[in-house]
Image (cartoon, helix red, strand yellow):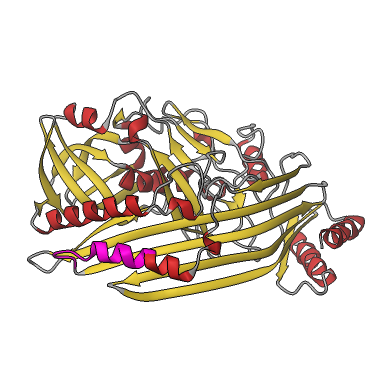
Amino acid sequence: MRKQLKQQIERLKAQRATYIDVRWYPYEETNQYLIWNGNLKTTAAARESGIGVRVLYQGAWGFSASSDLSNLSPIFDQAFENARVAAQRVTFPVRLAEKDSIQAQFNTPVQISPFDISLETKVAFLTDIDTKLNQTNVAQRICGLDFVRKQIIFLDSDGSEIEKNIQDVFSSMAVTGLDEEGNMHDRTFNLPRIGSSRGWESIDPILFHENADRIVKEMNQMLTAKQCPQDNRSVILLPGIMYLQTHETIGHALELDRILGYELAYAGGSFVTLEDFGSLRYGSEKLTVRADATLPNSPGSFGYDDDGIEAQNNLLIDKGILVGAITGRQMVEEANAKAKREIFSASSGANRATSFYRVPIERMTNINIDSGSDGTLEDIIKNTEKGIVLDGDRSWSIGSNREQFHFGTEMGWLVEDGQITDVVKNATYQGATVDFWNSLTAVGDQSTWQVHFVDNCGKGQPNQVMQLGHGIPVCRFDNVRIGE
Ligand SMILES: [Zn+2]
């Protein structure tokens, strides 16, 4: 098959196509299991395979995909034909940043493949956790397992040949209770990155048991908690909400295609402009953010992107100053041309497609915040006069250009004079993105740093769901509006 694909690439090259690449998925498999109040609600398995072909011709892309690989020529011809038609209409001819020809392989670190585990074992795990969650006041309990494995062979007209074998594991459990007024309160646990591999071995029953007791206890605290106050104070964000803050107001805002206006019709744009790179004070000096696709064991680490660029660890915000973006080969050239200066020297290796039948677009890798020097969570609380500790995402609303946000959290713990006093319900906080990140006054040390996975990031038309990670510490922001 690889030989046939290479022959097709050579055939289009001879017809003066500028660049050709093909992603061949021999297989992509997903398994999903969900238990809901003791009932096995979902056991789903899916499998697909096929190829996606991109052809660049006279500054325009053509794309074609098929799961029928019995006759390859029409798929390649269709992609070329689409490029020819598009070339007559293109307003900004595509140029691709330089890249090396790469022969490589990437394998996700996995000890035990979840696909080798029996259905009985998986259901027994879920039943065990469900039984554990079945405690006083728990009106609803949900526990799920999600597994993905895929092989991707990437070939291009520059001679690259990259094989990727990727596996991902996602798991979560959640409980819901009703307070006196009948309002629902959820408490959720999402499996964070633990250890150095992501196979079945990361589904640790002891970890789930410990956290099951914790989330039920915290949910029960919510049911009798008083209302979150409305005032301005310090907010201390735990990783369970800090990941979403980072995702929505840094990650999405720094996707270069969005900055250039390509997502306006769907998921919105970005307040960031090309002039901002190198000068915008995005946050306080305590804020250093990187797109790190080299982080071991995360769905945002994939070895090589779908442009065939090796995974990188790039600074996005350096001590508060905006210095980088989430980029692919095409957008860096367009951005440099439109800015009339070289902002980006090369692609940052973040162009990814959700499947063989979608084109790659700029996606977050692992958008991480460096841990800081303000100690443990306990230290930060001790050094806070009037604040609130927040955790768990409950609701989110983001400005269409990511310029403001409003988040509701599952949990809120008030802090007065360095001590936690009360638990409060319906906690919310809001802000203007740049002002908020500039009010960052404490960043926790490595003991507070966790990697949270996102398995459902949506972008693009047609929609592409993508998986990634966020490595984040506990952070404190001052003078934030809460409770509205
Ligand atoms: Zn997203």
Q: How many marks?
A: 0
Residue at point 83% right, 73% down? 71
Residue 59 makes an appearance in the image: no
Residue at point 53% right, 40% down? 296
Q: Quadrant of the N terminus?
A: bottom right
Which of 132/188 is in front? 132
User: Could you tell me what secondary structure mostly forms the magenta stretch?
Assistant: helix
Residue at point 59% right, 49% down? 108
User: In the drawing, does residue 167 fall left or right of residue 206?
Assistant: right
User: In the drawing, does residue 220 fall left or right of residue 348?
Assistant: left
Which of 162/401 is in front? 162
User: In the drawing, does residue 196 fall left or right of residue 158?
Assistant: left
Which of 14/151 is in front? 151
- Against 304, residue 425 (above or below) is below
Which of 4/170 is in front? 170
The span shown in magenta is 125-138
Q: Where residue 10 sits in the image (x, y, percent)?
A: 89, 56
Judge whether residue 128 is colored magenta: yes
Q: Where residue 241 sits in the image (x, y, percent)?
A: 31, 47
